[in-house]
Amino acid sequence: MSPRAYRQSARAHAVQDTEQQIIDALIALLEERWFDEITLDDIATTAGTTRQTVIRRFGSKTGVLSAMAAQMDVSIRAQRWSTPAESVADIVTLLMDDYERTGDILVRTLGQEARIPEFAAVLDRGRRGHREWIEDMFKAWLDKLDDRAREDRLAQLLAQTDVWIWHLLRRAQGQSAANTHRLMTQAIERLLHEDRTN
């Protein structure tokens, strides 16, 4: 690699590192504050950079939020589709692994949805991704149903696998991760058992 190419590569890596630090800073701040309480200066200080750098890289606080959402979407998709799932317990394991990492910030974000218009696109993207994943994971069960029954069962599966269910069990009730996995698995299996007995 020529000296010039090396310098360009080093600069590109430095830009990526700075952008990642800025995104990580917003994630950390969202764990303790509401989005509308966070300023560009807060993000810059937490990232160890300047307000001008944040603006230059992302344009605005909303730009950082969009980049954070895109990165989380890629990470969630990679993790959720990482392993073949052959049973309901396998599917819940993939879901729990995701929620144990991202569940708290997702719930905190959902709690701000009505107050922060910028969150609509972020959360809608997440809902579409979750629906796509549920349709894929439960395809073998859903494909056995007629159109109306399939839509009903899909709606119920989306509710049973929602992050709020995880939050109610893990945080509000203080259930262990293992117990939460067991309870969510049982609830979903009961739903699917109805299709076998009808």
Image (cartoon, helix red, strand yellow):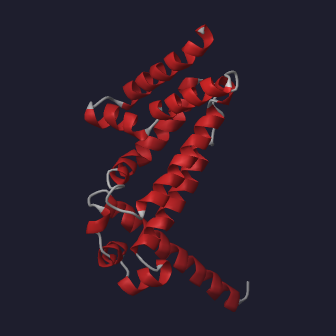
Residue shown at 37%/52% (left/top)?
A: 105
Quadrant housing residue 130: top right
Outermost residue, right direction?
Answer: 1
| Residue positioned most to the top | 197
From the viewer's perspective, is residue 116 above or below residue 61?
A: above
Depth check: 19 or 133 in front?
133
Is the residue 101 above or below the residue 30 in the image?
above
Where residue 40 appears, x then y in whole percent? 34, 77
Q: Where is residue 69 drawn, in percent x and y? A: 49, 60
What residue sits 60% from the left and 9% below the top? 198
- Taking the spot 27% from the left edge, 31% from the top edge, the residue there is 174
Looking at the picture, how far across and down is residue 73, in whole percent? Answer: 54, 54
Q: Is residue 177 left or right of residue 7?
A: left
Camera-nearest residue between 74 and 16: 74
- Specify whether 43 is left or right of 82: left
Does residue 106 appear in this view? yes
Please say whether residue 50 is visible from this viewpoint: no
